[in-house]
Amino acid sequence: MGCWKWFGKVLDEAGLEVTEENAEVIEEVIHEYIGEQSKYGRCSADWRTARKEVQSNPAMRAELVEKLKSIA
């Protein structure tokens, strides 16, 4: 399962529909963002926990949405 499936609401906010062509890029952006945030202790490296943390933190959510918007 692609990590992007955990972030459906964030993808909706970014105006992205996952397709075969962009799924890999979306996954890379999310992996990079979660990896960076967990490295700095801002969120967990565990995907289930990280998803909840990102969705409940307006600043982190906005950052990830902006990164995902750059894909479109």
Image (cartoon, grey):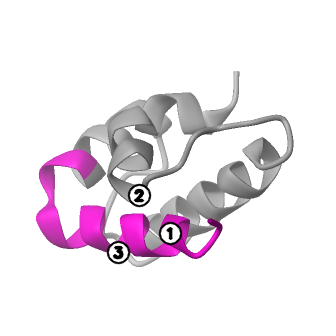
State which tag comes first along the sequence, 3 or 1. 3
**Secondary structure category for the residue under label 1:** helix
Residue at x-position 44% and y-position 53% = 15
State which tag comes first along the sequence, 2 or 1. 2
Which of these two is toward me, 52 or 27?
Answer: 27
> How much space separates mark 3 and mark 1, taking CA atoms?
10 Å
Q: Is residue 2 left or right of residue 39?
A: right
Disc 2 marks a residue whose amino acid type is Ala
Residue 53 percent across, percent down from the top left: 24, 49
User: Which label sits on residue 63?
Assistant: 3
Which of the two marks, 3 or 2, is nearer to us in this view? 2
Disc 1 marks a residue whose amino acid type is Lys
Q: Which residue is mark 2?
A: 14
Dominant secondary structure of the residues highlighted in magenta in the image: helix
Residue 25 percent across, percent down from the top left: 76, 57
**Magenta highlight on residue 66:** yes
Q: Which residue is mark 1?
A: 69
Residue at x-position 53% and y-position 65% = 68
Q: Is residue 55 left or right of residue 11?
A: left
> How much space separates mark 3 and mark 2, taking CA atoms?
10 Å
Q: What span is in magenta?
A: 55-72
Residue 54 percent across, percent down from the top left: 28, 53
State which tag comes first along the sequence, 3 or 2. 2
Instruction: Tell me the quadrant of the picture where the C terminus can be found.
Output: bottom right
Instruction: Determine whether label 3 and label 2 are within 8 Å by CB.
Output: no
47 to 14, vertically: above or below: above
> What is the crowding at mark 1: few (fewer than 14 residues within 10 Å), some, or many (at least 20)?
some
Disc 3 marks a residue whose amino acid type is Glu
Tell which residue pokes out farthest to the top in this image: 1
Place residue 63 in its image quadrant. bottom left
Which of these two is toward me, 51 or 44?
Answer: 51
